[in-house]
Image (cartoon, helix red, strand yellow):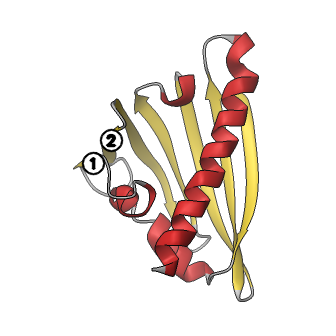
Amino acid sequence: MTEVNLTVSVDAPAEKVWDVLADFSGFLNWAGGGAGEITIEGEGIGMVRHLKMSGDELAERLTLLDPVNRRFGYDLVYGEPLGMKLYKAIIQVVDVGSVCEIVWKGEFDTGDPSSEDQAAVALSAAYEGMTEALVSYLDR
């Protein structure tokens, strides 16, 4: 498995950022820019969000929800986002005063060692893009 780690500072209170990120079923509210479809299966740990965005379909299962430490995690159920056949992520929101940091950690496998570096760059860019979308959503 290849690992991607990215820590991004956000000029917002940790609790406000956590409230948005921890809403697993509300992903498209902030990340989709109003585009795409989401359906939810179940609730709490084990729930699955089925996403249709830009012609792609995928599903992710919530595997960790830790409000005390502001961490959540999910695994890919189906789909191949960015060419990844296996993918799991843990995201944490860290309070650093009036701002916070979002710590993105993803592990993946493309099934093709020659494509791992390209997928890692794309995943890091996706984390940056999601952070920008989140900041834009919070600024509304």
Q: Quadrant of the N terminus?
A: top right
Picture coordinates of residue 49 (x, y %)? 32, 46
| Residue for point 73% across, 35% down | 3
Q: Position of residue 112 (x, y in %)?
A: 65, 10
Q: Is residue 109 above or below residue 19?
A: above
Numbered label attached to residue 17: none
On the question of residue 106 being in view, the answer is no
Q: Quadrant of the C terminus?
A: bottom left
Q: Residue at x 52, y 61 (%)?
A: 133
- Which of 106 and 140 lies nearest the eye of the viewer? 140
Gap between marks 1 and 2 measured at Cα: 5 Å
- The answer to which quarter of the image holds residue 58 is top left
Q: Residues within 10 Å of mark 1 (few under 14, many from 20)?
A: some
Residue at disc 1, secondary structure: strand
Q: Position of residue 79 (x, y in %)?
A: 41, 26
Q: Is residue 69 above or below residue 111?
A: below
Closer to the chain start, of discs 1 and 2, is 1
Check whether the beta carbons of the residues at disc 1 and disc 2 lie within 8 A of each other: yes
Disc 2 is placed on an element classified as strand
Direction bottom: furthest residue = 98
- x 60%, y 45%: residue: 126
Which residue is disc 2 drawn over?
A: 51
Judged left or right of residue 62, residue 94 is right
| Left or right, residue 62 beside residue 109 | left
- Amino acid type shown at disc 2: Leu
Residue 42 vs residue 140, the one in the foreground: 140
Residue type at mark 1 is: Ile
- Tag on residue 38? 1
Label 2 Cα crowd, 10 Å radius (few <14 / some 14-19 / many 20+)? many
Q: Position of residue 73 (x, y in %)?
A: 53, 51
